Image: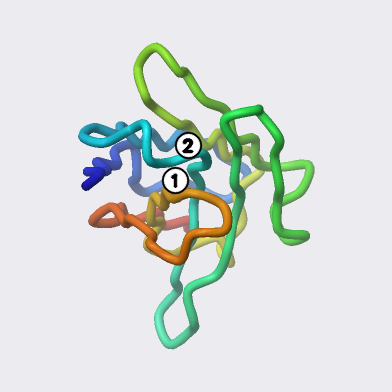
Amino acid sequence: QVQLVESGGGLVQAGGSLRLSCAASGSIFSINYMGWYRQAPGKQRELVATITSGDITNYSDSVKGRFTISRDNAKNTVYLQMNSLKPEDTAVYYCNAGRIGVPLRYWGQGTQVTVSS
C-alpha cells in the first residue's frame, strides 16, 4: 500500500500562483510515477500532469506553460507549481501514484484550489 497526503491548496486570485505538495509513504518501491489529477464540480476527473521516476513529465494541454511538476526523491514528494492561475483551474486536485503498466492506482484525499476572477 502507498499513502498519499496532499497539501497546499487554497484560494487565490486569477493570475496568482500556488504550489501543491504530495508526500508518499508506505510501499514506495511499488510505484514509478506520481502525478496530479483534478475534478471540477459537475465534470469528470482529468489528468493535470505526471512525472516518472526517470523525471519524464507529461502535461495536459490546458496547463502546459503554466504548471510545472517536479519531485524530491529524498522526501518521496511531488510538487505542482501552478502559475498564471485562471478561474477554470478551480477544482479539487488529487495526487495519484502507480506503476506504469499495472492497473492499481493510489489516490490522495484531494485538496481544493479556488481561483477567483
Q: Earlier in the sequence, mark 2 or mark 1?
A: 1
The percent position of residue 81, horizontal first and vertical second, equals 55, 33
| Disc on res. 39 | none
Q: Quadrant of residue 114?
A: bottom left
The percent position of residue 8, horizontal first and vertical second, equals 34, 37
Whether residue 110 is visible: yes
Query: Image point 49% across, 49% down: which residue?
Result: 99
Q: Amino acid under label 2?
A: Leu
Q: Which residue is mark 1?
A: 12
Q: CA distance from mark 2 to mark 1?
A: 8 Å
Query: Image point 35% across, 17% down: which residue?
Result: 75
Say how the picture is coloured: rainbow
The percent position of residue 86, horizontal first and vertical second, equals 61, 56
Within-10-Å neighbours for mark 1: few <14, some 14–19, many 20+: some
Residue placed furthest toward the top: 74
Q: Which residue is mark 2?
A: 18
Q: Secondary structure at mark 1?
A: strand
Within-10-Å neighbours for mark 2: few <14, some 14–19, many 20+: some
Q: Secondary structure at mark 2?
A: strand
